[in-house]
Amino acid sequence: MDKIKIIGGKELCGEVNISGAKNAALPLIASSILVNGKITFNNVPKLMDIKSIRLLLEDLGATCKTSKGYLEVDASFINKIEAEYDLVRKMRASILVLCPLVARFGHAKVSLPGGCAIGARPVNMHLSGLEALGASIRIEHGYIEATAKRLIGNDIYFDMPTVTGTENLMMAASLAKGTSVMRNAAREPEIVALADALNKMGAKIQGAGTTIISITGVKSLHPADIKIIPDRIETGTFMVAAAATGGDVFIKDCVPDHLGGIINKLKATGTMVETFKDSIRIINHKPIKSVDIKTLPYPGFPTDMQAQFMTLMSIADGNSVIHESIFENRFIHANELLRMGADISISNGNVAMVRGVKKLQAAQVMASDLRASASLVIAGLIAEGTTTISRIYHMDRGYEAIEKKFSMLGAQIERIP
């Protein structure tokens, strides 16, 4: 397996371009199942998760053609409604094919999904929502099987906001008979991007980006060209890395309006943040001030930036409290930061006390999940000596050529086969 080798202590300076958002691309690609025809996606990031969902669609019978930044999906000839374990186990987002298959073909059999080891992340709200739309659900031998002659519009209430649940059921309701109203829906930009794309395909969706989404079902959707929005988590990762290294980085092709929670917390650390229409400049030549964070559903501070921010707080002046309220078991990276000289203690499983130290020390560390890998890269960039990060296949699931982008900013970083 590949590793990442970093010689720390270099300030990051220069410009970096942000790739398309993984968390937007996955539901958009899954939505192509709803259409009898070709959907073209551009600004598609080159990631393992994108490859995984493409292979899954091809196994179902869809035709996929790829070129740099583009993916064309033709689901006209799907002849299979079973998403098998070997294809689904690598990525939790595979559950996003469940509702499109039921909505278009009336039947789906999908393996219970896998993904990062950051908590249970159950799919019960997906299933209860599908049942509300008239589907019959069975779970046997590790598979979800759903059937419905045609889905019927209904009210759906989420006990708590769920991003993939909102996306999945929004796709289902798009082809349901009648009107569906989703209450306590998630509000993430990726949900707005999916709603905009579905509307471009002929759906009738209102309210995306708010807690109440109304969908009037249509008989069929038509092909369209879709552009993937920029990745706000990749943007946030480079923002934190620039602040942590005391650098000056201009981040291009991003959407500052999607990053309010991160921007506010970074400003509180004393970092200078300048925002423009589609770019952000990060400057920090001062000691980092400690700040507390609590992860919350959008527009709060994102759970996918908690690990990166913990690394920043590990060298802050003072103590900070980090409260993870979205996922359990998402502090595994703290043990690796401890190996690098950080002073972190965990209580109740979801609260971390981070006592800032002057410097981190290089070490051999291991990534446990996608965002943990990013936090360790940032730690390696600011540590004294040479850091080696193993199990970086997690990182390849969500960051496109991250070592090349950091290298262009002046970091001494390389991938070791």
Image (spheres, grey):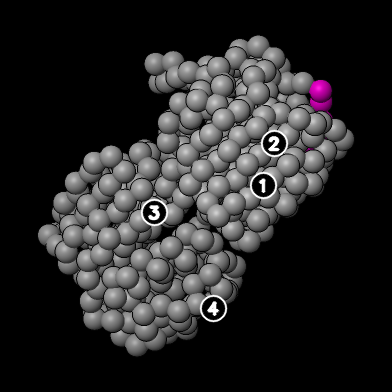
Please, what secondary structure does the residue beneath circle 2 have? strand
Report if the CB atoms under discs 2 and 1 are less than 8 Å apart: yes
Cα distance between the residues tagged 3 and 2: 28 Å
Q: Residue at x 59, y 58 (%)?
A: 257
Q: Disc 4 marks which amino acid? A: Ile
Q: Quadrant of residue 62?
A: bottom left
Please, what secondary structure does the residue beneath circle 1 have? strand
Residue 267 in view of the camera:
yes
Cα distance between the residues tagged 2 and 1: 9 Å
Report if the CB atoms under discs 1 and 4 are less than 8 Å apart: no
Q: Quadrant of residue 188?
A: bottom right
Q: Nearer the viewer, mark 4 or mark 3?
A: 3
- Which residue lies under the disc numbered 2? 283
Q: Disc 1 marks which amino acid? A: Glu
Farthest residue toward the bottom? Answer: 178
User: Which portion, as a residue range, is magenta?
Assistant: 354-358
Report if the CB atoms under discs 3 and 1 are less than 8 Å apart: no
Q: Residue 37 location in percent, x, y?
A: 16, 64
- Which residue lies under the disc numbered 1? 274
- Which residue lies under the disc numbered 3? 228
Q: Residue 371 location in percent, x, y?
A: 56, 39
Q: Residue 47 location in percent, x, y?
A: 37, 39
Q: Nearer the viewer, mark 1 or mark 4?
A: 1
Report if the CB atoms under discs 3 and 2 are less than 8 Å apart: no
Please, what secondary structure does the residue beneath circle 3 have? loop
Q: Residue at x 56, y 73 (%)?
A: 210
Cα distance between the residues tagged 4 and 2: 38 Å
Q: Nearer the viewer, mark 3 or mark 1?
A: 1
- Which residue lies under the disc numbered 4? 212
